[in-house]
Amino acid sequence: MSIKIFDTLTAKTSEFTPLKENEVKMYVCGVTVYDDCHLGHARAAICFDIIRKYFEFKGNKVTMVVNFTDVDDKIINRAKLENVAALEISSRYIDKYFRDMDALKIKRATIYPKATEHIEHIIKFVESLIEKGFAYEVNGEVYFEVSKFSDYGKLSKRNLDDMLAGARIAIDERLKSPHDFCLWKAAKPGEISWKSPWAEGRPGWHIECSAMSGHYLGDTFDIHGGGLDLTFPHHENEIAQSEAKTGKPFAMYWMHNGLVNINSEKMSKSLGNFFTISALLEKFSPFVIRYFILSNHYRSPINFTIEKMQELEKSLGTLVKFMKRMKGFTGALPAVGAAELKNKRGGIKSEVLDEADAFEARFNEFMENDFNTAGAIGAMFQYISIFNSRFAGEFDNKSEAAAYVYGVFMRYIELLAIADNDFITAENEGIADTGGLAEALIGVLIKVRSTLKAEKNYKMADFVRDEIKSAGVVLEDTKEGTKFHIEKK
């Protein structure tokens, strides 16, 4: 395996080397469960879903931990508003999270730990930081003393002095520094709480991820991921408290997905440009949503517009048309499954085999370079054009070749989860099948045009060519005869 990853900590792209050969341990920050998941959550989930799946695709065992923050000020405030228990709120939105993620074809993580189920681990973690001199108690609350951790700011590339200069930081006279952050928060009357050596209360936000990742993956693990907005302060604070406790590197690689803008503005409820996953799924197929996310590099910012989604819906339709066409050529032959691919080469046209192999190599080249799904999808469409031209004419074992190509493409379509066999074979609106009868009719029109040219009726021959092109079919005159391919819209 040779996969290159951009590491936020070093700000460099380098070859990924797991701590244990053929095993990848990764922790991805999940959601605070007080409301419906939105498009930003969808992007993070889809990006790390494909990263995880590609590691597995390359033969690795992946342990993926995605946490739930199920106790938090936002959850408590929502519970007060609805006059219900805080854990009723978190339970409700955990259920909705799974419904949304399942609909988006997200493979479930290995483990989904909840903060409330790891209070004991969190308390022991805080006690250890106090014993080592990195944390202190104030009126039943515990704070991490940032100045004691000399590497603070190494992930976000921030300097403490620069952060203080001109910053509007609320002064808390109890703290040794305004940068110190809460590890254990004392509960207010009526709030959900747990007993601790300091006061009844609950964990701070940052400590839960350090405690849970350490519990399931060990002091040091391979990859820590999340949205770019978590780099500071959340991930910076995780590094500080974890490495202060263990004296070891926390995560070997840090990966962050880019943020989502709506109509070129930051997504915000107050601006009214806020899209929940459930609302998007009412308008678009989950495959179109995944296709939108994966058509961009995971680290790049993306801009969501309805027009862009409609454009991509048509683009995905081109992929489906191609797969329908290949399936139409196979006749009675079954499409070739991934396990059978290399055993079906005998007797198939060599150019088709070479091009299928070239497509696979190109796709994997992009994926192995920091999971460049945008490039991989671009390669897919490049070879769709090549295969459309290749299959325009007749040749021996065409059915077997089409089955082979279908199998190769299906392998990577299913990896990206931008379509499945049911979606391809369904009668999708606006996605016409170019195999079967349509194929025969195009052949008839080609013969009509050839006859017109033989009769030197070039005006009508050009009219037939232009009309066919307006329907999305491009004719190409070659030494072997007239070929056609479906024009990418």
Image (spheres, rainbow, N blue to C red):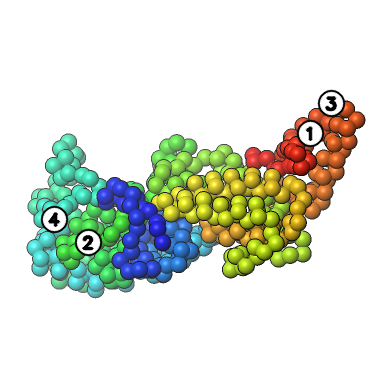
Q: Amino acid at mark 1?
A: Arg
Q: Amino acid at mark 3?
A: Lys
Q: Residue furthest right?
A: 455
Whichever of callouts 4 and 3 sits on the residue coming sooner in the sequence is: 4
Secondary structure beneath disc 4?
A: loop
Q: Is residue 36 left or right of residue 326?
A: left
Q: From the viewer's perspective, is residue 365 above or below residue 207?
A: above
Residue on which disc 3 sits:
459
Q: Which mark is residue 192?
A: none
Task: Give me the C-alpha separation between circle 1 and circle 2.
Answer: 65 Å
Residue on which disc 1 sits:
465
Residue drawn at the location 53% of the way across and 59% of the way down: 415
Residue on which disc 2 sits:
249
Whichever of callouts 3 and 1 sits on the residue coming sooner in the sequence is: 3
Q: From the viewer's perspective, is residue 85 above or below residue 443?
A: below
Task: Give me the C-alpha separation between circle 3 and circle 2.
Answer: 74 Å
Q: Quadrant of residue 476?
A: top right
Q: Residues within 10 Å of mark 2 (few under 14, many from 20)?
A: few
Whichever of callouts 1 and 2 sits on the residue coming sooner in the sequence is: 2
- Asked whether residue 148 appears in the rendered view, the answer is yes
Task: Give me the C-alpha separation between circle 4 and circle 1.
Answer: 72 Å
Residue on which disc 4 sits:
149
State which mark lies toward you, 4 or 1: 1
Q: Is residue 266 left or right of residue 383?
A: left
Tell me residue 292's x, y (percent): 52, 47
Task: Give me the C-alpha separation between circle 3 and circle 1.
Answer: 10 Å
Screen quadrant of the C terminus: top right
State which mark lies toward you, 4 or 2: 2
